[in-house]
């Protein structure tokens, strides 16, 4: 009986890795622009914690548009970045590997602010969990931080600031662009945490 985590290398999933210490973490390169940086951030925390790290590659870039994809924003897109059904795609890809490894609980890194999109809501997690558990081996999908803000999660996880600084949040590139929704969330979170952060992405604890 093992636990697994979908690890994107962002602040939320990095904090959950620190908090929950899964047996295995899964990072998916689905063709997003920042795949390499996300993989490196994920690998770093897995090495630090002794977590087995699995990297899955499935190029879905022709199916995405906007910030994280290699194409222009779609005119019909509801936001600056759009990969329809991405979260269920990623959970399904990881579940396909996880179930063969004996994982019984798969954690995903959704937090409260992800509820702006349907695929970040508690209802979505409940529906996806029902479907996946119904299909194979009673694999459970859980989002342990879905009622927390990113700041609350970071504090609850106890992740040290120098490890949190490994997080890669930029949607557009391997080197933070400082001007996308992912970068903005990164800076906003550091402000809330009481750290000052220069725009090169280096963090400096002030407390
Ligand atoms: Zn960015």
Image (cartoon, rainbow, N blue to C red):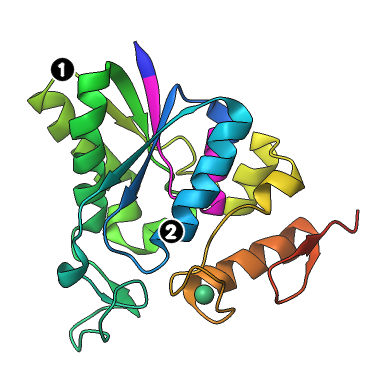
Q: Quadrant of residue 163?
A: top right
Residue 122 falls in which quadrant of the image? top left
| Helix, strand or loop under label 2 | helix
Q: Position of residue 169 (x, y in %)?
A: 52, 62
Magenta region, residue range: 3-17
- Front residue of 136 and 131: 136
The tag on residue 23 is: none
Q: Is residue 149 visible?
A: no
Give the percent coordinates (x, y) of residue 56. Answer: 28, 43
Residue located at (28% from left, 58% from top):
118
Q: Which residue is mark 1?
A: 137
Helix, strand or loop at disc 1? Answer: loop
Q: Is residue 22 above or below residue 175?
A: above
Determine whether 30 is above or below 156 in the image: below
Can residue 105 be spotted in the picture? yes
Residue at 45% in and 44% down: 146
Q: Is residue 38 left or right of residue 177?
A: left
N-terminal label among 1 and 2? 2
């Amino acid at each position: 009986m093992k636990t697994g985590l979908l690890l994107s290398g962002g602040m939320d999933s990095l904090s959950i890795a620190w908090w929950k210490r899964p047996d295995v973490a899964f990072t998916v390169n689905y063709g997003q622009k920042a795949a390499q940086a996300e993989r490196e951030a994920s690998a770093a925390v897995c090495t630090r914690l002794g977590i087995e790290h699995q990297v899955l590659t499935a190029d879905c870039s022709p199916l995405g548009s906007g910030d994280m994809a290699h194409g222009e924003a779609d005119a019909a897109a509801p936001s600056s970045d759009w990969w329809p059904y991405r979260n269920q795609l990623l959970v399904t890809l990881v579940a396909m590997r996880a179930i063969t490894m004996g994982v019984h609980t798969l954690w995903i890194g959704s937090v409260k602010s992800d509820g702006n999109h349907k695929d970040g809501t508690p209802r979505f997690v409940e529906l996806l969990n029902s479907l996946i558990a119904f299909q194979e081996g009673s694999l459970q999908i859980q989002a342990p931080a879905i009622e927390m803000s990113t700041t609350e999660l970071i504090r609850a996880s106890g992740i040290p600031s120098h490890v949190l600084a490994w997080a890669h949040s930029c949607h557009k590139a391997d080197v933070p662009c400082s001007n996308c929704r992912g970068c903005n969330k990164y800076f906003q979170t550091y402000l809330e945490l009481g750290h000052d952060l220069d725009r090169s992405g280096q963090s400096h604890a002030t407390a």
